[in-house]
Every structure is written in structure tokens, then in C-alpha cells.
Image: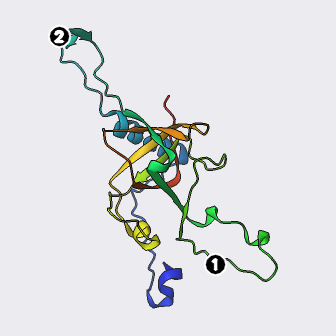
Amino acid sequence: MRREFGNSLPVVKVPKSGGVVDLDFAYRSRAQMLQLRSYLYGQSIPLPPGVTNATLGGETMQDFTLSPHSLVIEFSALKIYRIGEETMAPSSALPIGASRAVSEMQPVLVDPAQSGSGLLNAVLALLPASDFPLDDDAIVDSDVVGFIMVASIDIHNKQMTILSPGPGTFQGRTAIIGSLEWQEQ
């Protein structure tokens, strides 16, 4: 905030209350994974007491866990951006006397065909559908309407398999990749 607003905005540190407990990394990581699993698969629905199994369409079912929609899409169907400093070359890699022309909040288009794209198992934030191409400011300031996960990448056929909590089309959509990854277990 200081970079954006300078010293014109005072920042006040508020002390923690007496009952506040710091959560360790392992707990936070486990909670994130459970939330992502719940988002993609839904909540498990237990059978009522006394019912040993149920039928759906004539088939006996004992597990009512939902499944995410698995879709194979072309690389060109989804524009994926990465936002942040880690997407730029380090200052030491620039010519002597040159400085970065890219800001920390500038979206950089990710090429799924590149081996170092980091898309495999990545959780992507899906932006609202738009009838026109989004500029950098619109991408950064846009709301997130959902999340999808890249399950596999087929570089030879220029396709990727994504998991989504519901059906839909992703043609012409924009997504943002962050640092969150998820693998089914």
C-alpha cells in the first residue's frame, strides 16, 4: 500500500487479541486443499441412518460424491495471464543501465506450450466473459467468477484438460494463474 499511496495514507498496526492463535503452514495448506476439493467435487452426501444403499437410474449407489466436469480445450480457447514480479526477468539479466519497463501489476500472457509455464495442476481464476478483449487494467481490476484446475497438458495437440465444478464453455475467456496448485489424491 505504501508503494501505491506513499506516505499520504497512515498505516496503523493493531495488536492481536489475547485469544488469537497463529495458524501454521501445514494447517493452512490442508485447509486450502480441502476447500478446493469441496469446490470441485461438492460436499459428500451421507445416506440417512438405516439406509444401506440407494438407487439412481436403476444402479445401486453407496457414494454420493460429485465429480467435476472434465473438459478438453484448445490452447487458443483460454487466454491465461500471470500477474506479478516473478514473471519478469531479474534485473541482473537486463543490459547494463537498462531498467524494467514492466510494473509489478502488469499481466503477462502465459504460453501453455512452453514447458516452464507452470500450468500443470495450477488453479486458474476465471474472469467474467467479455465481448471485447480486456486491457491490462481491466484484467487486474476484474472480479473473479470461478476457479478451474489444469489437470493435463497435451503440447503435441495444443490442448489441455481442465476440471470445472460445472459445465460451460471457455472459448474466448480470460483466466489468471497464481501460485496455488492442486492435485487429486
Task: Please tell me whether residue 78 is drawn above or below residue 156 in the rendered image.
Answer: below
Q: Which residue is mark 1?
A: 101
| Residue type for callout 1 | Ala
| Residue type for callout 2 | Gly
- Neighbour tally class for label 1: few under 14, some 14-19, many 20 plus, Cα within 10 Å: few
Please tell me which of labels 2 and 1 falls first in the chain: 2
Q: Quadrant of residue 168?
A: top left
Secondary element under disc 1, as helix, strand or loop, is loop
Residue 25 lies, in percent from the top left, at 54, 48
- Neighbour tally class for label 2: few under 14, some 14-19, many 20 plus, Cα within 10 Å: few
Please report the residue visible at 53 percent of the width from the left and 70 percent of the height from the top: 106
Task: Please tell me whether residue 109 is drawn above or below residue 155 in the rendered image.
Answer: below
Please report the residue visible at 50 percent of the width from the left and 28 percent of the height from the top: 185
For the image shown, how many numbered marks are present on the structure? 2
Of residues 51 and 41, which is closer to you in this image?
41
Secondary element under disc 2, as helix, strand or loop, is loop
Q: Residue furthest right?
A: 96
Residue 60 horizontal side relative to residue 36, left or right:
left
Please report the residue visible at 40 percent of the width from the left and 70 percent of the height from the top: 138
Q: Residue furthest bottom?
A: 8
Residue 8 lies, in percent from the top left, at 45, 91
Residue 98 horizontal side relative to residue 128, left or right:
right
Residue 62 lies, in percent from the top left, at 28, 13
Please report the residue visible at 25 percent of the width from the left and 22 percent of the height from the top: 46
Residue 54 lies, in percent from the top left, at 20, 12
**Residue 50 badge:** 2
Circle nearer the viewer, 2 or 1: 1
Of residues 50 and 58, which is closer to you in this image?
58
Q: CA distance from mark 2 to mark 1?
A: 67 Å
